């Protein structure tokens, strides 16, 4: 019965909330593990109580699971029980007063502006270097991917799956389909616009901007990440410090450091909640301190 209840919840998440496949798979693993724990106590999701939820979290801690991972599991369990209550399958929600495991949010890894410029310069040089047609095509694709990523701050999944139709007529903007199939329009800077115009002229007809021979029809995130680490090595930057999401972090951090409004950055990144975007405000600490010291009237000589 537990598996049936989990399946019904996941169907709702997919149909009503547009949850991505990776999200659904993660929820399935977490909830089936929770249901297995309840079964060992002679309970089901319909009969579990607050003590069962608390003991489950204690068992995760004993297994060495981090606070952030435990908090993620509790979030899935909480949503699951809210679904059961909303469908009148049970009365009280046993997670209602269960505290989330304490966790400190890690600051994102960020490359400096100079390091990003070095990556872009190296990628552009590779794209213009002589080589076989396949080598030149791969180098140009990587350069365009990098320019688009740093120009827009897209999630890597959004980037590699871009459709050619997402590039607007004059290539000044691009339409990005994010979580929950929500679309947002993001402007392109001159460098990205010029790179994509050059790249489009080399493409054969097809639906995707970065086509590949795999089942999905477009470049995999893993291939992009591998190529990006190789580029980092050629640019003299430690490969461990460079990944597609690091460029997304750099986009947001560098915009804020340059004076961009937090809500504008939220919109560009496709964050539903501004609290998610606020993680990047750490880059403003030094700037704000200097601003206050320079302009506060009591600091004037």
Image (cartoon, helix red, strand yellow):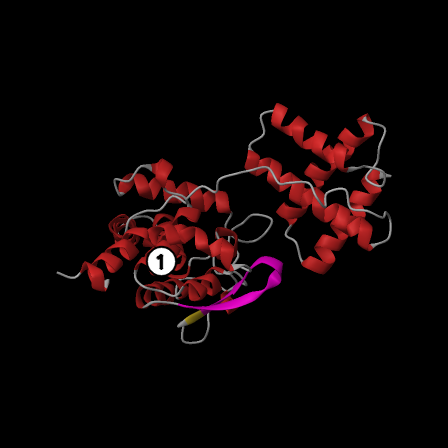
Locate the N terminus and report the quarter of the image it occupies: top right
Residue appearing at x 72%, y 46% in the figure = 96
Q: Please identify the quarter of the rendering in which residue 170 is found.
A: bottom left
* Residue 267 position within the rendered picture, expressed as x and y whole percent measured from the top left: 48, 65
**Identity of the residue drawn at 56% across and 35% down:** 67
How many circles with numbers are drawn on the protein?
A: 1
Relative height, residue 131 to residue 29 (above, below): below
Which segment is the magenta one? 174-187
Q: Is residue 17 left or right of residue 278?
A: right
Judge by depth and name the residue closer to the eye, 205 or 171. 171
Q: Seen from this angle, which residue lies furthest left? A: 301
Quarter of the picture holding the C terminus: bottom left
Q: Magenta stretch: residue 181 in it?
A: yes
The residue beneath circle 1 is 147
Please determine whether, in this image, residue 240 is positioned above or below residue 158. Answer: above
Residue 42 appears at what percent x and percent y?
85, 28
Quadrant position of residue 40: top right
Does the segment drawn in magenta span residue 89?
Answer: no
Query: What residue is rendered at 27% in x and 54% in y?
Result: 289
């Amino acid at each position: 019965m537990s598996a049936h209840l989990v399946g019904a919840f996941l169907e709702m998440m997919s149909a009503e909330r547009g949850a991505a496949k990776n999200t659904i798979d993660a929820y399935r693993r977490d909830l089936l593990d929770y249901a297995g724990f309840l079964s060992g106590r002679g309970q089901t999701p319909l009969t579990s109580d607050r003590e069962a939820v608390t003991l489950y979290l204690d068992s995760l801690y004993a297994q060495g699971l981090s606070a952030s991972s435990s908090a993620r599991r509790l979030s899935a369990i909480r949503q699951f029980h809210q679904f059961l209550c909303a469908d009148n399958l049970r009365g009280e929600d046993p997670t209602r007063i269960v505290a989330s495991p304490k966790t400190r949010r890690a600051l994102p890894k960020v490359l400096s502006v100079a390091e990003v410029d070095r990556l872009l310069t190296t990628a552009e040089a590779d794209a213009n270097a002589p080589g076989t047609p396949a080598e030149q095509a791969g180098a140009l694709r990587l350069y365009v991917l990098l320019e688009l990523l740093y120009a827009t701050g897209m999630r890597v999944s959004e980037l590699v799956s871009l459709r050619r139709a997402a590039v607007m007529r004059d290539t000044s903007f691009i339409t990005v389909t994010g979580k929950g199939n929500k679309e947002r329009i993001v402007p392109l800077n001159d460098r990205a616009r010029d790179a994509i115009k050059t790249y489009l002229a080399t493409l054969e007809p097809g639906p995707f901007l970065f086509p590949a021979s795999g089942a999905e029809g477009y470049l995999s995130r893993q291939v992009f990440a591998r190529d990006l680490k190789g580029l980092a090595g050629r640019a003299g930057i430690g490969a461990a410090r460079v990944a597609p999401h690091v460029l997304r972090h750099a986009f947001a951090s560098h915009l804020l450091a340059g004076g961009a409004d937090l809500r504008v950055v939220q919109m560009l990144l496709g964050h539903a909640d501004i609290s998610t975007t606020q993680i990047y405000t750490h880059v403003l600490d030094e700037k704000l301190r200097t601003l206050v010291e320079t302009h506060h009237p009591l600091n004037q000589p």
